[in-house]
Image (cartoon, coloured by chain):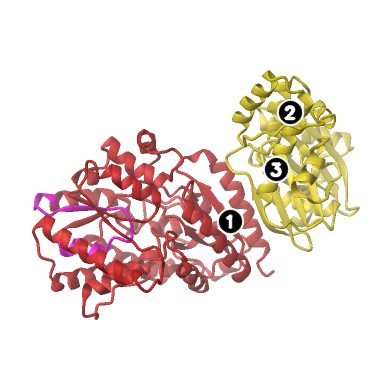
Amino acid sequence: MICAGIDAGSRAIKVVLFDPAASRPVGTGITEQGIEQARLAEELYDQTLREAGLQRAQVRSVVATGYGRTRVRFADTTITEITCHACGVHHLVPDARTIIEIGGQDSKVIQLEDGGRVRDFSMNDRCAAGTGRFLEVVASRLGVDLTALGELSGHSEKPVVISSTCVVFAETEIIGLLAEGTPARDIAAGVQTAIATRVATLAGRALARPVCFTGGVALQTGMIRALEAALQLPVRVAPDPQFTGALGAAILAARRT
Amino acid sequence: MIPTDSSCSPGGTSGPAPGPSAWFADMVDHCYAFAEAAKARGCPVVGILCEFTPRELILAAGGVPVCLCGGNAETIPAAEQFLPSNLCPLIKSTFGYHVTGRNPFLKWADLVVAETTCDGKKKMFELLGESKPMHVLELPHKADDPDALEHWTEEVRKLKAHLEQRFGVQITDAKLREAIRLMNRERGLRRRLADLMVREPPPLTGRQLIEFKSIISGIPADLEQYERALEWFGSGSAAQPASAARDEARPVRVLLTGVPLVHGAERVLELIESGGAVVVCLENCTGLKPILEDVDESELDPVCAIARKYYHLPCSVLTANTRRLESLRSLAAKFRPECVIELVWQACLTYDIESYHVRKLAEEELRLPYLKITTDYSPSDSARITTRLEVAMEIARARRPS
């Protein structure tokens, strides 16, 4: 028997098929989020099953998470991304006590108890400051690909200070910096620092170690360094950070049955 | 959770309200008719903007005390022509009603009584005072300072003199005692209604309960309806099968604290209860806070008795506001919440900062999950708030003994 987790995020939909008996994933899939969210999730789910040589009937339970979780029609239930990321990260990094998750439109700091239960959490409210959205805006403004932005920042020797926490204001600030001839690499590094600082503020008081970094933004080279500097703590990246939410959802689906 | 013959959703206002809830669904209309009739009789309408205002004095002066606090997002843009956008929505909405002339009670008001509470209100009163007669009481901010109650009592006496002079009446001790009895009766009835929420499951939702209040105090018909509601919800007919209490899916009992949920601004309460929770205790100025203590009817000087009761209101403008923490402690023991949620209006600095103490109390002392929600009257962040509420409920449920 197999259990499935669907993480319908703001930028990407992720699927994990999990075998509870073997306690490991047997299939994963990812696609970009779009307008027809319900259909996209369903297609990705079926495709991932096909690739794993499985059929829907073999799936015992499906849990959906992510901001689009209620649009996943074939899910048995929904669980928030906080609880799912906590569960997924705990499975992969059992000693993690703090999770920093930066996704397309939110950033979250999750504190775990022994055993992986959520003790406390904080997340950004209305504003997209300190999220992947910020990186997207900057990448497009600098005319580079999102992945190239991370590499670019690695060459910076003098990261700029971005003082605006608001993405819209920050973009104006960046236009000003470009007009002054500031190198793109310094802007890229400055933006990563700004995001990391914002997340460190969200994290607030003393964080329990070890700190595990997950979510799509954890794939950005340079973000780990920026986060370690802002938190003044070593940060570990979760394996396959884009999938920890879907993995957690799949594991929680297994526990439900 | 609600009597079987009702079709009222936790949303409260949708669909026909059950029994006595129907009366309060038209609360503003009743108040309008009441104030209009009083005005026609020559009774002054006195606007109030805070729970610190001793309504007893206004009633004893033959006036109609009416709460003018705004809970409507639509009046905010008009207010922002005069007030900074980075100000709490309650102040902006209240003032916006003044700018747009959309609040008939404010138009009718012969006098507006206010206090030096937070900076935003205090300075807004100056603007309101340009076109409305205002009387501002100075509220001492150092709670429990030896001189504070004395000073506050003097301020209450000055209000009494002001009302007498402005309306050409004499506020006798007998009239004051009558007003005290009336207000105590109203507070007592509302308190008993709120106390029904100690039951598991509670006989009504928090959204239903918050309807049981009126912007004008002491309306005889309201008092009758409070009595009816007590019978209606207090009777055994509202009880649920015992098995429901064991259900893992039973609603999470929530204590909601922080800023007031003015009529029309109940969105967060609705979001909480639509996500598998029930607000069993509302510890704010639109809930239990102002009705927990009565005015001592036996005290020789009624003005002193009134001053004392109001001075005890644990508002975040006071420093240090330890009385609020004491109140939260005893309310938590009584209502047995499984989660504490704090609501802070954007730019309400005093509640925002004080949340540090409330979080500490909830997490370290009461050992309950705590969630702070900072928002305003705009619904743009409802989806994000819902997610955070869902997490809080998941945490609270995970802590239930299995």
Residue B348 lies, in percent from the top left, at 46, 50
Whether residue B326 sits left or right of residue B68 in the image: it is right
Going by the numbered disc 1, the residue's amino acid type is Leu
The residue that appears at 45% across and 59% down in the rendered structure is: B205
Q: Residues within 10 Å of mark 1 (few under 14, many from 20)?
A: many
The colour assigned to chain B within the rendered structure:
red
The numbered disc on residue A197 is: 3
The residue that appears at 78% across and 31% down in the rendered structure is: A158
Going by the numbered disc 2, the residue's amino acid type is Ile
* Dot 3: chain letter: A
Residue A252 visible to an observer of this rendering:
no
Residue B390 visible to an observer of this rendering:
yes
The boundaries of the magenta stretch are B39-61
* Dot 1: chain letter: B
Q: Nearer the viewer, mark 1 or mark 2?
A: 2
Identify residue for label 1. Answer: B371
Residue A14 lies, in percent from the top left, at 77, 38
Going by the numbered disc 3, the residue's amino acid type is Thr
Is B227 located above or below residue A33 in the figure? below
